Image (cartoon, rainbow, N blue to C red):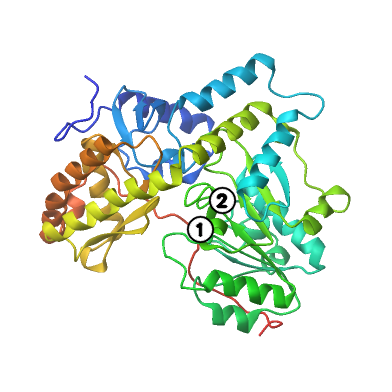
């Protein structure tokens, strides 16, 4: 029988997941469309591989097992699965069509709405994915400044200009790799020392889990302006989540350009680039960035409905309050149960992360153990608390009860010295993303 959500459940039967995976191995390379959803991030042998249904904050796998989902589709689910107001907007638009031979009025309506809520949105460009708009922002920044080089911090998608500085850079010409440099978050002095007349743009996630030092983002804006470098905020995670207007609203700072995608359409594929009118003007004639599906109307309708819900229901405030219950509750449990020297939950309340200290041992093994035990108890867990509006107080109480169950087991496993022997499935794989090993250089090439 398929698992329901209950403590001390059995490890789920994943027979159908595994059958699908075997089929996928024969026809797909790779088997996943995004690494964070792939089998390397969920322990093979215990975790499901395929989901077929979501409602609110719960999901069901192909074997019928039910879970509370703490991943929120790796970010896009800001309101909840099958959220009525958004689904109804999609259905209504579906009656009239999906994609057309001319522009659609919803393109104008959405852009006007975004201009109302995003602080720097003098102009708006609509596309499909986060990588699209990140690359469009870099291209227009290069055109506007007449410069080539880019400073970046965080993760910005799969396109050549960024992925060339990661460990997965095969296929990216060295000439492209040599134009992008990484800098350390919260280190303003290193940026000041490196900025010169060759730097077109500085792009960063306003925060990932670490908070910006007081004045850090404002000072970045000032030094970029003084250097003629465009400041770009990658708000894939912060936008519409930490505040409806994103980090710019939350921290009261404007970027020259900002990009959004994950939270603004509750799962439908859409991405937004906002920014200064004089910069965005270049898209009219000089800079090419177009896509057939940018005006796809179901996503436009979903985006409008989602932003209205986020604003009218004060969703960022809800995510902050309920996320705090989960983050603070985890840390209180860790202290109470004597595992605080091994683990701590960090980050902003709307998106926090469970971390493990060096004292806990091999981090991937420890995370794998925690994941298998949380999945056993009906929580789809990958180390993050990606909050959505459908996460109820009851969900949070249940998740904390599961943590109360699991943390003593984790402590015993760590202190046994052989945590790997207690794993029911394969150890999780490391992700490739570089947010360290900073290589910032210019003042023209120092």
Foreground pick, 213 / 133 = 213
In screen coordinates, is 192 left or right of 71? right
Helix, strand or loop at mark 1: helix
> Which residue in the protein does label 2 denote?
245
Q: Quadrant of the N terminus?
A: top left
Instruction: Locate residue 48: give its quadrant.
Output: top left
Q: Residues within 10 Å of mark 2 (few under 14, many from 20)?
A: many
Quick one: which residue is furthest to the right in this view? 285
Kindly tell me whether residue 131 is visible in this rendering: yes
Foreground pick, 352 / 414 = 352
Kindly tell me whether residue 46 is visible in this rendering: no
Helix, strand or loop at mark 2: loop
> Which residue in the protein does label 1 denote?
250
Q: Quadrant of the C terminus?
A: bottom right
Whether 260 is drawn above or below 435: the answer is: above
**Residue visible at 23% across and 26% down in the picture:** 4
x, y (%) of residue 388?
A: 41, 40
Residue contact at pointers 1 and 2, CB within 8 angstroms? yes
């Amino acid at each position: 029988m398929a698992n329901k959500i209950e403590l001390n459940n059995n490890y789920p039967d994943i027979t159908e997941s595994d059958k699908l995976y075997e089929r996928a191995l024969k026809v797909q390379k790779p088997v996943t469309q995004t690494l964070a959803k792939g089998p390397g991030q969920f322990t093979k042998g215990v975790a499901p591989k395929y989901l077929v249904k979501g409602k609110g904050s719960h999901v069901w796998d192909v074997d019928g097992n039910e879970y509370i989902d703490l991943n929120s589709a790796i970010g896009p689910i800001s309101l909840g699965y099958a959220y009525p107001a958004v689904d109804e907007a999609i259905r209504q638009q579906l009656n009239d069509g999906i994609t057309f031979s001319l522009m659609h009025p919803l393109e104008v309506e959405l852009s006007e709405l975004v201009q109302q809520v995003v602080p720097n949105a003098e102009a708006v460009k609509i596309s499909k994915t986060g990588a699209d708009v990140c690359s469009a922002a870099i291209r227009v920044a290069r055109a506007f400044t007449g410069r080539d080089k880019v400073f970046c911090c965080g993760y910005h998608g799969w396109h050549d200009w960024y992925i060339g500085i990661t460990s997965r850079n095969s296929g990216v010409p060295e000439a492209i790799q040599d134009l992008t440099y990484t800098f350390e978050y919260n280190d303003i002095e290193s940026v000041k020392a490196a900025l010169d007349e060759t730097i077109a743009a500085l792009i960063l996630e306003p925060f990932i889990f670490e908070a910006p030092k007081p004045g850090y983002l404002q000072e970045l804006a000032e030094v970029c302006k003084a250097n003629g470098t465009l400041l770009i905020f990658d708000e894939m995670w912060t936008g519409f989540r930490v505040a409806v207007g994103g980090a710019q609203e939350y921290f009261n700072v404007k970027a020259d350009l900002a990009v959004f995608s994950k939270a603004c359409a509750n799962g439908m594929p859409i991405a937004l680039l906002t920014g200064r009118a004089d910069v965005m003007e270049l898209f009219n004639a000089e800079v090419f960035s177009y896509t057939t599906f940018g005006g796809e109307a179901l996503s436009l309708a979903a985006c409008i409905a989602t932003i209205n819900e986020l604003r009218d229901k004060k969703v960022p405030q809800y995510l902050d309050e309920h996320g705090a219950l989960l983050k603070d509750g985890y840390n209180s449990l860790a202290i109470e149960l004597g595992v605080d020297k091994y683990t701590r939950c960090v980050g902003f309340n709307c998106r926090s992360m469970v971390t493990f200290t060096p004292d806990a041992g091999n981090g991937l093994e420890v995370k794998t153990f925690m994941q298998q035990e949380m999945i056993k108890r009906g929580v789809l867990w990958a180390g993050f608390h990606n909050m959505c509006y459908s996460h109820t107080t009851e969900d949070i109480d249940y998740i904390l009860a599961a943590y109360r169950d699991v943390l003593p087991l984790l402590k015993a496993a760590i202190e046994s010295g052989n945590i790997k022997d207690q794993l029911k499935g394969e150890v999780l794989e490391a992700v490739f993303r570089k947010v360290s090993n900073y290589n910032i250089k210019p003042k023209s090439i120092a």
